[in-house]
């Protein structure tokens, strides 16, 4: 079984237009992002900054859990879970 990653519209150019992609064999979120980058080059730099930290304007959820309030990039990604990449929305 794999982890399903939901990809927002703005990042679908990296996934060939796919709104969801599967990633196998990633125990943690950082491993998942590394595997995602291997299959879809360029996506990791849109999610993580140059220091390897989650960008301020990107939210990541493992299941229903916001990783900023869970284990950060060390958050476990068990088989069957859905990871959602959600860009922050601002405006007024």
Image (spheres, helix red, strand yellow):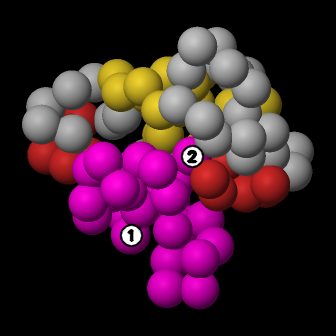
Q: Is residue 9 or residue 28 the one in the foreground?
A: 28
| CA distance for labels 2 and 1 | 14 Å
Q: What percent of the width, then of the height, locates residue 75?
A: 80, 45
Dot 2: element: helix
In this rendering, position of residue 75 left or right of residue 38: right
Q: Give me the residue at 21% from left, 26% from top.
A: 18
Q: What percent of the width, then of the height, locates residue 87?
A: 44, 47
Q: Which mark is residue 45?
A: 1
Query: Which of labels 2 and 1 is toward the front?
Result: 2
Q: Which residue is mark 2?
A: 32
Q: Residues within 10 Å of mark 1 (few under 14, many from 20)?
A: some
Kindly give the residue lying farthest to the right in the view shown. Answer: 70
Based on the displayed image, in which of its 4 quarters is residue 42 positioned?
bottom left
Quarter of the picture holding the N terminus:
top right
Is there any visible trace of residue 39 in the rendered image?
A: yes
Q: What percent of the width, then of the height, locates residue 65?
A: 78, 31
């Amino acid at each position: 079984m794999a982890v399903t990653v939901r990809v927002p519209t703005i990042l679908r150019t990296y996934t060939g237009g796919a709104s969801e992609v599967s990633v196998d064999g990633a125990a943690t979120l950082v491993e998942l992002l590394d595997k995602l980058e291997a299959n879809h080059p360029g996506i990791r730099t849109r999610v993580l900054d140059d220091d390897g930290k989650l960008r301020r304007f990107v939210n990541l959820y493992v299941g229903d859990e916001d990783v900023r309030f869970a284990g950060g990039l060390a958050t476990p990604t068990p088989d069957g879970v859905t990871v959602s990449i959600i860009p922050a929305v601002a405006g007024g």
